[in-house]
Structure formats: C-alpha cells, structure tokens
Image: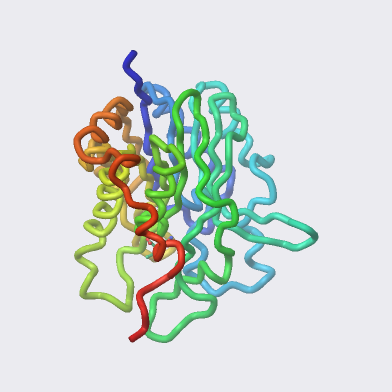
Amino acid sequence: MARSLTLAVCQTGPVQRAASRAETVGRLVHLLEQAAAAGADLAVFPELALTTFFPRWMLDDDEIEAFYETSCPGPETQPLYDAARRLSVGFALGYAERVVENGRVRRFNTMDLIGRDGALVGRYRKMHVPGQETPEPGTTVHLERRYFEPGNLGFPVFRFGDVRVGLALCNDRRWPETYRMLCLGGAEVALIGYNTPMLLDEAPALAHLRMFHNHLPMQAGAYQNTLWVAAAAKAGIEDGQALIGGSCIIAPTGEIAAQALSIGDEVVVYRADLDLIAACRRVNFDFARYRRPAEYRLIAERAGPPED
Ligand code: CDV
C-alpha cells in the first residue's frame, strides 16, 4: 500500500519582543488550523517560535528569563497543544528551554515533536549552536552561545504513527552530518525550524546568496540522504533585524516541492510520497551496499581540517 504523510510548513512573520505569549500562541493556533483545513498530518513551526530571536542582543541576567519556557506545554502554550488534539494534527515547535538537571540550570535551543493527541513524542536540542558568548568586533551580534548550551540528546528519530521523523534547528541545516545522522537513524522526514538574518556584517558580499545558502544544504541533505525535508522560517523585520523566509518542503529527489512566497505568517502544505524514498535509494543510494563507514573514521575523530 502506498505510504504518504501530508506535511505543513507553518512559517511565521516576526514575533516582536513586545508581543505577549498569548498573542503569539494565538497566531500559531491559527496556522495549525489552516494546516488542518488543508489536510495536514504534521506541521513544523520555526526555531524559537514563541519569542523574538533574542540572541541578537546582549541581555542582563534578569532580562533573559522571560524568553525561556520552564515547561512545555505551560499555561500560555497549552492552547496550541489543545488545538493539536482537537484538529488531530501533530506539530514540531522550536522554543528556548530552561531546565534544572542534577541541580544545575541548563538552557537549550529546543524543538519538541508533538503527536496528534497533543502529547510529547520526543525532544531535540540544537546541536550546532552558532555565534559568540560575548559580542566580537566586526561581526554581527549573534549570542546563541551565551544563551544556549549545545544539545545533549544526539540526533533522535521518533515514530509519528508509522513514519520515522527527525528534528533539526537552523544552523544544523548547514551541516551534512545532521542529515546523515538522521538518515542512519532511519528518518524518512526531517523537520527544521530556523531564524536566519538577511545580513551578516562580517560577510556583506555574500548577502545576495542568503537564500541560495538556505536551500542548497537542505536540498543536498534531502537528496543525499533520501529524506523529505520540511523547513519553517521565522521571517520579516523582527525588532529591527531582517530575517529571511524561503520556508519549503523538499523531496528526496532534492527538488523543492512547495515554498512560501511571503515573509509573513503562511502555511505551505504538500503530500509527501514516502515511497519515493525507496525509489531514490534504488537509483543512487543503496547505503548498506555502497557506503564505506570504515573509511570515514576521520569524520567522527576530527572537527576540522589540520591547521598546516
Ligand atoms: N539561528 C541560527 O542558527 N542562525 C544561523 C545564522 C547565525 C547564520 C543560521 O545558520 O542561519
């Protein structure tokens, strides 16, 4: 029997710092309703979907707490989980997670996968955390490494019904290891959320390539790992900073099957043919037969090329 999963990318426009959680969650519920009306099984929201992208600022300790969730769902986010159950649509949601582990406060850039019943299926914590801990002269202020530890949950693959789903967040999408780990874990679908500034001060000459460099690694990752990729941006002018859109659904052929056209709240829906994965494997990527893992040891042993 043919297998498919109807995916929805729920791109959002900016979430300004002044916005209340209730207002933002209301927008997300409305997007989920649109996804359900279009027949979606599973939706993906952006990275840090509940707040402005606060790592663009150097903040005092007493200012940062407002951006983190101490439980998800919490009182303010519960309506989104209730909507999932009411609509019978799953979703993946990016948010800033504050957790106490072994008596220590830890902060992660997190994405949860939620089932059609509104219950947690699984959690991913962003692995590739870019930026700096304190502002560095000549670079765009991007302080994710101040506000988040690198993830400590690996690259898990979860069951959503009979479909195997992996998660990734923003900068993760630029690294081939992300997709390979998900592929080797059995993922058929990768859900990605992102916040990507249009301009990076350190590389203004590359500004015209921002969208190309958004889609290039996701298309390559989908193709080389025979995955469906669904990626949701937070886009538009957010607290004075321009974020790119370009949210899309990518087939295991590497083709963009559907793409958002706006830089605001927008839902893109596409029925992903999961049998295409096997077809793509037959053509080029019979992994078990042709890969040479014993020859790839350096990938696990070295972070980068030798210095000299
Ligand atoms: N949120 C991100 O991880 N943003 C990075 C920027 C800083 C380059 C990205 O890869 O899009």
What residue lies at 33% left-to-right and 72% top-to-bottom? 200
What residue lies at 47% left-to-right and 51% top-to-bottom? 47
Residue 209: image quadrant is bottom left
Q: Is residue 221 visible?
A: yes
Q: In the rendered image, which quarter contains the C terminus?
A: bottom left
Q: In the rendered image, which quarter contains the N terminus?
A: top left
The colour scheme applied to this rendered structure is rainbow
What residue lies at 63% left-to-right and 56% top-to-bottom? 68
Relative horizontal placement of residue 132, taking residue 308 as reference (left or right): right
Residue at the right extreme? 103
Image quadrant of ligand 1 equals: bottom left
Which residue occupies the foreground of this view, 25 or 222? 222
Relative horizontal placement of residue 12, taking residue 29 as reference (left or right): left
Q: Position of residue 104 (x, y in %)?
A: 75, 63
Q: Is residue 237 visible?
A: no
Q: Position of residue 197 (x, y in %)?
A: 35, 63
Q: Position of residue 265 (x, y in %)?
A: 37, 42
What residue lies at 63% left-to-right and 60% top-to-bottom? 107
Which residue occupies the foreground of this view, 65 or 91? 91
Q: Position of residue 286 (x, y in %)?
A: 28, 38
- Is 233 rendered above or below residue 305? above
Residue at the top extreme? 1
Relative horizontal placement of residue 124, taking residue 175 as reference (left or right): right
Residue 176: image quadrant is bottom left
- Is 12 rendered above or below residue 128? above
Number of marks in picture = 0
